[in-house]
Image: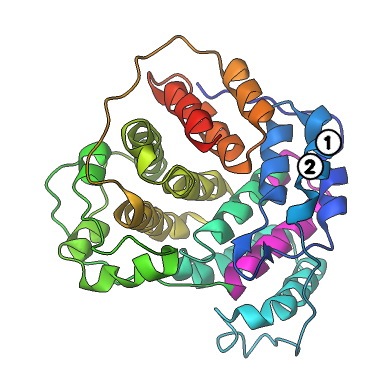
Amino acid sequence: MRVVVVDTDDYLDEAYERLRDTGPERDGWLSNHAPMAVEALTRRGRGAVVHRWLDEYHDKLESRPRGLDRIHQDSWRDPLGDPLRTGDWLNFFEEEVRERDWREVLARWWPRLLPGIAAGATHGVIRVGHAVRALADEETQPRVVELAHGLAYWAARWQPLAPAGEGPYGANDPRSALDSVPRVADQRFGIRHRLAQLAVTDRWSEASGAVPGTGEIRERLASIVQASVLRYGTHGHGSPVMLVHASTAPNAVLRTLPELPQRLWQPSLEAAWAATAAVTAAYSPSEPRPPSEHHLLDPEDVMSQAVAGGDEHAIKFVDTAIDFAEVPGVLDAGLHAIRLIA
């Protein structure tokens, strides 16, 4: 059973309208988390705090970048992954969703963008996942535009991971598979420096290419997300903020699957696992810490603590944890994230 609480008011569309002319990044690289956080807040029945939260986040917002040149349908490959063309990608995808149904745009561009799932430290796919979940609840013009902006951000920061090999892997259990992912050697700098090392990291190809889990695709992907959330409880101290994305990135893919053609599900599973493994390799500490004792936590209480703390990463991680609230230890991991990130 999944816990879902959706505000019936239009707080989310109001928030998207406030954010429409903001850029997807600030300070040259850091992601604008506001569109993702406000979707999580409204999804969990916290619409009444959205505008106050945005007021406090305001100093982290920058204006939408201007375009340099028009991107055409037959020449999209050259500007892919060029952050200087962010404004052009925003213009391009806004036009795409004006002319076509959003599901058609998503199905066309998902396989093009999926190989670059590391885009913006995985924030490209995460932002798209939040937008798709909002659209699946209700199709409104602000939500369609937000999907366009998420796709544009993903395209502008498109970044492939080192090629994955093929199994067999030592275990079908996702938690054991995550524990076996090799760490990159140099963990002193940012994510681009760390991901660049994957190509020369021993056993990376085998680990990233052998997707763990059994059963049908959605079940396997859900088990990967769940395992990553639980692992945060013992390894989150390695990088409290960045290791959040080992869970939120694959969950964004999981949330998007129902709106995609089934032919795209298998490559989506593979890319989601590769993203989780990559973040784990880049930021996992050398030694775990004992997990906190399991408590009978209430999802509403844990989300309330995330909201009180105000941090966008904690809010999004708890939002993902609540998707698996019935699993022992998952909400404890969410509470652990709130405390680590505070």
Which part of the image, by quadrant, shows the C terminus?
Answer: top right
Q: Is residue 188 magenta?
A: no
Which of the 4 image quadrants contains residue 155? bottom right
Residue visible at 47% across and 34% down in the picture? 340
Question: Which residue is label 2 attached to?
Answer: 56
The residue lying toward the viewer, choosing from 34 and 261, is 34
The question of residue 139 being in magenta is answered with yes
Q: Position of residue 46 (x, y in %)?
A: 75, 27
Residue 161 seen in the current view = no
**Front position among marks 1 and 2:** 2
Mark 1 neighbour density, 10 Å: few (under 14) some (14–19) many (20 or more)? few
Hey, what amino acid is under mark 1?
Answer: Arg
What residue is pinned by disc 1? 52
Vertical placement of residue 119 versus 207, above or below? below
Q: Quadrant of residue 32?
A: bottom right
Pointer 1 and pointer 2: residues touching (CB < 8 Å)? yes
Q: Residue at x 19, y 41 (%)?
A: 172
Q: Where does the image place residue 88, in percent across and percent down from the top left?
A: 73, 80
Residues rendered magenta in the picture: 135-156
**Could you say which quadrant of the image residue 173 lies in?**
top left
Residue 241 or 277: which is nearer the viewer? 241
Q: Is residue 336 left or right of residue 145?
A: left
**x, y percentage for residue 237?**
37, 39
Which residue sits at x=49%, y=25%?
335
Q: Position of residue 205 (x, y in %)?
A: 21, 65
- The three-letter code of the residue at mark 2 reads Glu
